[in-house]
Amino acid sequence: MTGTIAYPGRDDVTEPACLEVWAGSRTGPVVVDVVGALKYHGIRGIAWPLAELVAVAWRSAAAAGIGSEALVPIPLHRRRQRQRGYNQAALLAELVGRVSGLPVRAELLDRTRATEQQAKIEDRDQRLTNLAGAFVAGDPESGMQTTGVLLVDDLVTSGATAGAAAAALVRKGWRVDGILACALAAAPSVDTGNCRS
């Protein structure tokens, strides 16, 4: 399934740009529970079935003509990653990288500020405020043929995390072709009609 979210691209752009989301499933109680088992309870054995959902999303993106050069997982703050022992988005990206042949470039994006867990915040505006300035991206490298990347995350609910991460990459000159996820929420805030065309 696909959807779009609005996100602020460059600082000099006032209207939101669109970020395409490809997901292997719609968010539901079972998917949320399985992702939670990976994310909060360290059950890594379920990473492969979840990665297959992300691979389905990648195949949809590829069929739509998206020719990105790398996968960039949404990073956790260092403290949260130490608590969990790993970043579930990076684990999913590594597995999808094996299927897609795309390199995983986790070093291109850093979460420099600890934020409250997005899953605990229901209001979209509060989610956006929570993530303001949380991500920093690296500069594009001359060795890359293009600057096109796909973000990878587990769930896309309001799109605030993906949008903030994409905005950090865009400000550094990367082309963000979209985001791949296990599941996409059916919330109206995700499928927005106010994107700049």
Image (spheres, rainbow, N blue to C red):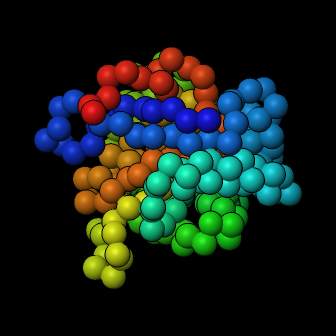
Q: Is residue 110 visible?
A: yes
Residue 14 x %, y %: 18, 32
The residue at 55%/52% (across/down) is 63
Instruction: Tell me if residue 82 can be seen.
Output: no
Quarter of the image containing the N terminus? top right
Judge from the rendering whether residue 4 lies leftward or rightward of residue 58; answer left or right: left
Residue 4's quadrant in the figure?
Answer: top left
Residue extending furthest toward the bottom: 143
Image position of 74 (left or right of 13): right
Instruction: Answer above or below: position of 46 versus 146.
Output: above
Nearer to the camera, 10 or 150 = 150
Residue at the (55%, 35%) spot, across then down: 2
Q: x%, y% of residue 195?
A: 32, 29
Tell which of 145 and 35 is nearer to you.
Answer: 145
- Residue drawn at x 45%, y 28% is 127
Whole-percent x, y for residue 189 in the image: 47, 21
Residue positioned 29% across, 52% down in the render: 170
Residue 52 horizontal side relative to residue 132, left or right? right
Give the answer, above or below, for where 145 lies relative to 81.
below
Q: Residue furthest left?
A: 12
Comparing 195 with 168, the one in front is: 195
146 to the left or right of 86:
left
Report the quarter where the C terminus lies: top left
